[in-house]
Image (tube, helix red, strand yellow):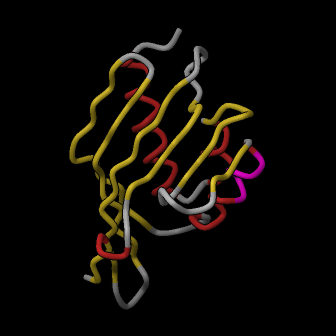
Amino acid sequence: MATPEDNAKTVHRYLELVAQGKPDDIAELYAEDATVEDPVGGEVHIGRTAIRGFYDAVANMNAECDVVTLRTLGSEAAFFWSMTIDLGESRMRIEIISVMTFNEEGKIASMKAYWTPENVTQL
């Protein structure tokens, strides 16, 4: 059974991989039957293959991900974080609140990301 400390490590690894733009590695953090809803209210991606396809959007992206606050309790984690994306001549920052649940093997079972266009700032 994964501990809250293990889950915190997975969150940090997830953010590292998002920043590095590695969709295959990100998908491996998820359980086979996991779900991703990003942003909440949007399409729900079900299963590792669909989740991997969703993360194609970050492939080879030049970004920085910073955790502002992370809480892990039991098999869940909630974290407020920002992603700053280098667009070449400009940059943008998205502030996101994400909630993850983890299965007994420590894989991400579900992820929901809470953000809207109001949370995007052009830098």
The quarter of the picture where the C terminus appears is bottom left
Q: Is residue 2 left or right of residue 34?
A: left
Taking the view exactly as shown, the residue that stands out farthest to the bottom is 89
Q: Where's residue 20, x and y in %?
A: 51, 56
Q: Where's residue 83, x and y in %?
A: 36, 62
Please give the range of residues in magenta: 49-53
Of 61 and 6, the residue lying toward us: 6
Vertical side of 20 occupied by 47: above or below: above
Taking the view exactly as shown, the residue that stands out farthest to the front is 41
Q: Main secondary structure of the magenta part?
A: helix
Q: In this figure, what is the number of numbered marks?
A: 0
Taking the view exactly as shown, the residue that stands out farthest to the top is 1
52 part of magenta stretch: yes
Residue shown at the point (30%, 58%) measured from the top left: 82
Residue shown at the point (60%, 54%) measured from the top left: 22
Q: Is residue 79 left or right of residue 99?
A: left
